[in-house]
Amino acid sequence: MNDNRYALKNAFLYTMLVAMLLLVPTYVYVTYMKHVKEIQYEFTLKGQSHLVIRAMEDFDQTQETPFEYPRFQSFQSGLYDEHFSPVFTLIKEPLAIHKVGYHIQDNYAYLVVSLPERRYFEAAYLIVGGNISYVSVYQDVVIILLVISLLIFILSLFFLDRFALRFLRVNQRLDRFIKDSMHEINTPLSIINVNIDLYNRGHSTNKYFQRIKAATKTLATIYNDMDYLIKNERIAFDYELINLSHYLRERIDYFEEVAALRNITIEADITDGIFLFFNPTQLQRIIDNNISNAIKYSYEEGKIEISLKANNDQCLMIFKDNGVGIKDSKQIFDRYYRENKEKGGFGIGLNIVKSIIDHANIDLEIDSKEERGSTFTYRFKPPIYYKS
């Protein structure tokens, strides 16, 4: 697993969790700040009402010049009689509450002020109002949340890296141990196979040596899977042109001794002249895991059918066995999953195959029935498939 991606993912999850926990205090804070905003706006409206009253008090009604009613850019006001009918008003909003005091309806705040009877143009009430905005409150909340989330995210990354450092060192030592172990396993496997081949050249076939050879090939398949897992994220697998027809026959010949150990027959129907532009290591993992699983899960004295066919612009590679079948054709690709633990293995082979075919855009169809066998059909398409 990529350690940086793991840290980023978990830091993001922790940040989202904290953000969820902050919803309640954020709601309380927003409600409180809106209330504060409304109180501040009330004082503002009171100040505007005093300006209007002062202008009316300063007006000399004995003069012939008309009274110029005060107008404001962000506020509206008006004079109303005792029945709240307008004497003169600049307010266009219909007001629902007709009583002295401070009122808010649909983000429109207004202040009703009682006037001395018949003193100001026969008006009984002065109303001053305006649209109250909570944008500044919401902006402050967003900024606060962003700052808190950013700090939490940075701190999460920092502490995750600190906490993971010890485990990273342990994993590094474990990786070195596995690499060394794999090297130590590969060396005796190679020695055993070479010596068996040398013995068979000078002596008649020995069934005991054949069993040893078959066992070492099974062990080599497991070794190759483990080796691929270790190298998968660290090296690039270059593609090259491969004679798939010839390569598949070679892998079938390789597993003949393993199949013979359980008296299983491998029948091959392979069309000549089929090529793939693919990586040999990855192709071997696909073929070897399918043949190995077919042998492992077939009944003794059974039959495995392997075919390679060209179908228009596609190539089909098919592995069919008459074994125990599959209960869950989706779960078998999960790493370390084994439907039958008595058969051995580590449950990593098909997981490797799935990662390879997904990356290479290779289609896989599985037809399986319990106690009747399974068929794996791989469909190769251009640009990786070529027909000579």
Image: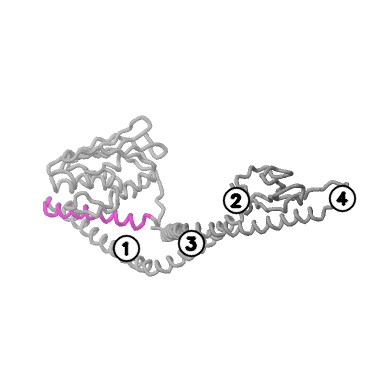
Residue shown at the point (71%, 55%) measured from the top left: 49
Residue 86 image offset from top left, x and y in percent: 70, 43
Amino acid, disc 2: Ile
What number is the disc on residue 50?
A: none
Residue at which label 3 appears = 153
Amino acid, disc 3: Phe
Compare residues 158 and 262 and report the one nearer the observer. Answer: 158
Q: Nearer the viewer, mark 3 or mark 1?
A: 3
Pick out the residue farthest to the right. 64
Residue 370 as seen in the image, left or right of residue 100? left
In this orientation, does residue 309 appear?
Answer: yes
Residue at which label 2 appears = 104
Residue shown at the point (77%, 56%) measured from the top left: 54
Amino acid, disc 4: Thr
Residue 116 position (above or below residue 319): below
**Sooner in the amino-acid sequence: mark 1 or mark 4:** 4
Viewport quadrant of the C terminus:
top left
Q: Nearer the viewer, mark 1 or mark 4?
A: 4
**Sooner in the amino-acid sequence: mark 2 or mark 4:** 4
Amino acid, disc 1: Lys
Residue at which label 4 appears = 62
Q: What range of the chain is rendered magenta?
A: 205-232
Q: CA distance from mark 2 to mark 4?
A: 38 Å
Residue 327 as seen in the image, left or right of residue 18? left
Is 317 in the magenta? no
Is 207 in the magenta? yes
Q: Tag 2: Cα neighbours inside 10 Å, few (<14), some, or many (≥20)? A: some
Residue at which label 1 appears = 179
**Sooner in the amino-acid sequence: mark 3 or mark 1:** 3
